[in-house]
Amino acid sequence: MQQIKQDKFIGKWVFPKSDDLEQQIGRDKSADINLIAQDIITKLKVIQSDVILDVCCGNGMLTCIIAKKCDRLYGVDFSEMLIDTAKAKNSSENIIYHIGNALEIDNIYSENTFDKSYIYFSFQYFNINTGEQLIKILSQLTKPDGLIFIGDIPDKRKIRIYYNTFRKYLRYIKNKYLRKLKHIDGEDSLGWWWHPKNIKKICKGLGLNCIIYNQDSKMIHSHYRFDVLIVNTKK
C-alpha cells in the first residue's frame, strides 16, 4: 500500500483528502455532472434494458445518474475509500460496485457481459501500452457490436491551449523531462496527453471502429479534451 500512496496519480484518488464529492473525482462546483452524464447517455445510446460497465467509477456521481436510464450498472474502482463513498452516497438497487484494478477487471467480469461500457475522467492515467490493454479488455467484456465510450481525454494537439503562456509551456517541458529522468509516470500532473491518431491506431489493431468527438463547448474542459466512441466490431 505504501507504493500506491506515493503514486502521483493513483495515490491522489485512492486516498482522497476531501469529503467533497466533486473534489474527490477531480471536479469543482463549476463542472456540471448532470451535463456530463447526459452526454454519456446520448453517445452510448443508453436504453432501459442495457447492462453497463463504468470503469474507474470513483465515488459514483456519474454512475448513479446513468443507472436511472438502464437495467443494471456495474461500477469498478481501485479505491476502497471511493467505493465505500459510492455505496453510501450514490447507490441504487440496480448498481453493483466492485473494488478492482481497471487492468484486471476481466478477472471480475465474464466476456460479453455488458451491452455498453465507459470510462470517464480517467483515461489520462493510462499510457500507450496500458491504454491499449484497457481498450482490449473493454472489448472482451462488451458484447459484439456494443459501444465503448472513453471520455474527457487530454488532447496532445492542444497542450499549448492548456499551457497558454510561454512560461507555463516551458515549465511543462521542464517537468516532463524531469519526470522522465526520475522515472515518474505521466507527462505532467494530469497524466498522459493522448493524440487521437494513437487511439485510432490501437482500435485498428484490435479490429475496432472508433469515432473521435470534439467535446461540446458547454463542457468545462472542452478547449483541451476530446472523447472517443468505439464500436465493438471484434471478431
Image (tube, helix red, strand yellow):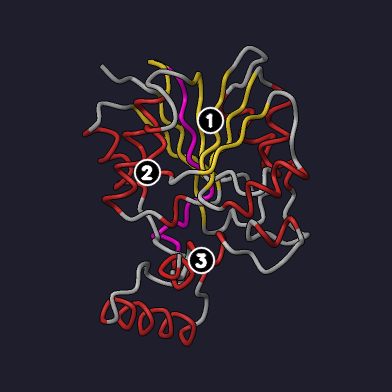
**Residue interval drawn in magenta:** 146-158
Q: For residue 103, which numbered disc appears in the image?
A: 2
Residue 204 location, x and y as percent?
Answer: 25, 33
Q: Secondary structure at mark 2?
A: helix
Q: Secondary structure at mark 3?
A: helix
Q: Closest to the observer: 157 or 143?
A: 143
Q: Earlier in the sequence, mark 1 or mark 3?
A: 3
User: Which residue does the numbered mark 3 point to in the structure image?
Assistant: 11
Q: CA distance from mark 2 to mark 3?
A: 17 Å
Q: In the rendered image of this protein, does residue 67 appear above or below residue 58?
A: above
Label 3: how many Cα within 10 Å (few below 14, some 14–19, many 20+) = some
Residue at image x 72%, y 57%? 22
Q: Secondary structure at mark 1?
A: strand
User: Which residue does the numbered mark 1 point to in the structure image?
Assistant: 53
Q: In the rendered image of this protein, does residue 13 appear above or below residue 51?
A: below
Residue furthest to the front: 1
Based on the picture, tell me whether residue 183 belongs to the magenta stretch. Answer: no
Left or right of 115, for residue 27: right
Q: Quadrant of the N terminus?
A: bottom left
Label 2: how many Cα within 10 Å (few below 14, some 14–19, many 20+) = some
Question: Which three-letter amino acid code belongs to the residue tagged 2?
Answer: Leu
Mark in the foreground, 1 or 3:
3
Based on the picture, tell me whether residue 149 belongs to the magenta stretch. Answer: yes
Residue at image x 62%, y 30%? 96
